[in-house]
Image (spheres, rainbow, N blue to C red):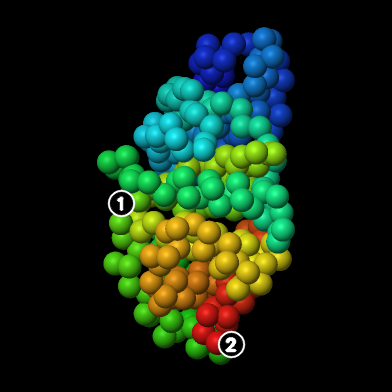
Amino acid sequence: MPDPARAAIEEQTGPVVCIRSAEAGLTSGIAAHVTTTEGAVFFVKAAPSAAPIAPHYVRERAANQALPTGIPAPRMVWADDVADWHLLVFEHAPGREANLTPGSPHLPFVVGAVHSIGIPCLWPGAPSVTVKVSALLRAAEEVLAGPRPEVAHYGPLVKALDLDDLTGTTLLHADLHTGNLLADDDRCLVVDWSMTCQGAAWVDIALLVPRLIDAGHTPAGAERVAAQVPAWGSAPVDAVTALAATRALFAARLAEVGPAHLRAKRARTATACRAWVEYRTG
């Protein structure tokens, strides 16, 4: 990070004496827990404005500025562009990655957090979830166009996905997984709003279902957890199945690229999505 950018952060936090990098994720920017001389801890995210990942930081900044106080998320305390870098400073979020396994004490807090998110989106510039799902569809179509007879029967399911079923004005995190759900003994915080969008209220919990299956739930059990979020009741049956099939093929496509640890995670997601599709289609 260039010196002017680092200095701008320390003007807000105070002198930094300890930096602990966050676990590597999908993005190439800086993500670190910083401790000041006064013992205060902040979470810093930063990336060069010319980096391919920069639009995610711009979206995260705009989304966090629009988050209502009732959303269970750490607050962004400062953000600016300095020396051609996007800089974001957040409150430090206590807790650890939520345990989504069956019977986990974290599950009620996760369900509560997902329910809390499902409010009208107050960010006027929020993109529609259909932008994200359109990208999933393009990848799914690439897979279907290849020599993969084992997924040929997914074709009609994917073609049946009607993007209008996903539209709406509800705030969506759109990337719920254990790394973005931090739980402790009495609550769950939702972090990393870089994919925030607006759409139908049921979409967030539908996107979480494969994560529950990957954590050990049966598809039926995962749907029972999903049903604890009231918005799940409004989900069109065919749209859910079509979205699951599309995401299965998208994850399979991504499992072919990137570092080995990411390919392995994507392969697990694809397996979970396939299990869900087979359950829903009988």
Residue drawn 34% across the image and 44% down it: 121
The spot of residue 264 in percent (x, y) is 69, 63
**x 70%, y 39%: residue:** 185
- On the image, the x and y values in percent for residue 142 come to 47, 75
Secondary structure of the residue carrying tag 2 is helix
Q: Amino acid at mark 1?
A: Thr
- Callout 1: SS: loop
Q: Please determine whether, in this image, residue 199 is positioned above or below residue 60.
A: below
Tag shown at residue 248: none
Circle 1/circle 2 CB separation < 8 Å: no
Residue 245's x, y, as percent?
50, 75
Viewer-nearest of discs 1 and 2: 1
- Looking at the image, which residue is at 67% across and 67% down? 217
Asked if residue 116 can be seen in this view, the reply is yes
Counting labels gives: 2
The residue at the point 53 percent across, 62 percent down is 226
Query: Mark 1 to mark 2: distance in Å?
Result: 37 Å
Closer to the chain start, of discs 1 and 2, is 2
Q: Amino acid at mark 2?
A: Glu
Q: Nearer the viewer, residue 84 or 89?
A: 89
126 over 208 or under it: above or below? above
Which residue was labeled with disc 2?
150
Residue 7 in sight: no
Residue 72 versus residue 162: which sits nearer the camera? 72
Q: Which residue is mark 1?
A: 169
Mark 1 neighbour density, 10 Å: few (under 14) some (14–19) many (20 or more): many
Vertically, is 114 above or below 70?
below
Dot 2 alpha-carbon crowd within 10 angstroms: few under 14, some 14 to 19, many 20 or more: few
